[in-house]
């Protein structure tokens, strides 16, 4: 079994190497405008959290107009809440792994869409110097879509929306939503 998995992996990597129109590596960072949606988010009157993200990007060119773009991104997400004179911040930070199909529609400009898997690494609500766990689920599954503009210099810009499909907290109708704006650089 292990041999067949290893041989399959070597075969797929070999195909990507032979057929790839080039592999580019890069880094990116930017602003997150995160919120939570769902019936329970509306009932709790939760507001968004503005924060940041940073990570690495790989572009695997399949043809002149199509590429696969996996990323590994630290993403600070969550919410804010103001009730009864108390301001609270819910911190739900993730290591996200989007795997996007990248379709070039004009010179340097592409649209992207694909699944995203997030691994929760921060799970707390903070208010008045105190913090408590939110008991968030460890994995967040969703989809991401947006646009990217790449310059010949290696500089690139992204605008993206990530829509969560899974509940952030078990049996509570709350899902992640994030608009992100990024700037990055392809160095290879």
Image: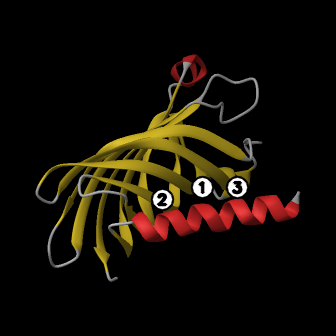
Q: Which mark is residue 130?
A: 3
User: What residue is pinned by disc 1?
Assistant: 94
Question: Of callouts 1 and 3, which one flags the residue occurring earlier in the amino acid sequence?
Answer: 1
**Which quarter of the rendered picture does the N terminus lie within?**
bottom right
Side of 45 relative to 188 (left or right)? right
> Which mark lies nearer to you, 3 or 2?
2
- From what the image shows, is residue 188 above or below residue 124? below
Locate residue 127, reporting x and y percent: 62, 50
Q: Give me the C-alpha separation between circle 3 and circle 2.
A: 37 Å
- The local crowd at label 1, few if under 14, some if 14 to 19, many if 20 or more residues have their Cα within 10 Å, is many
Q: Which mark is residue 55?
A: none
Q: Residue at x 34, y 82 (%)?
A: 188
User: What residue is pinned by disc 2?
Assistant: 70
Side of 93 relative to 9 (left or right)? left
> Which mark lies nearer to you, 2 or 1?
2
Side of 113 relative to 74 (left or right)? left
User: Observer-nearest residue: 144 or 178?
Assistant: 144
């Amino acid at each position: 079994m292990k041999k067949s998995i290893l041989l399959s992996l070597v075969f797929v990597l070999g195909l990507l190497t032979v057929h790839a129109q080039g592999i580019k590596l890069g880094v990116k960072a930017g602003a997150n405008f995160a919120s939570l949606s769902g019936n329970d988010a509306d009932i709790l009157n939760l507001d968004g959290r503005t924060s940041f993200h940073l990570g690495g990007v790989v572009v695997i060119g399949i043809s002149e107009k199509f590429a696969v773009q996996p990323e590994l991104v630290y993403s600070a997400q969550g919410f804010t809440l103001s009730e009864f004179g108390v301001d609270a911040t819910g911190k739900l930070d993730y290591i996200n792994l989007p795997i996007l199909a990248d379709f070039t529609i004009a010179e340097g400009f592409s649209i992207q869409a694909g699944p995203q898997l997030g691994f929760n690494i921060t799970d707390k609500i903070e208010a008045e110097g105190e913090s408590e766990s939110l008991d968030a689920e460890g994995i967040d599954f969703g989809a991401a879509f947006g646009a990217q503009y790449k310059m010949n210099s290696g500089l690139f810009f992204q605008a993206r929306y990530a829509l969560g499909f899974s509940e952030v907290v078990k049996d509570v109708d709350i899902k992640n939503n994030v608009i992100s704006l990024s700037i990055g650089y392809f160095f290879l």
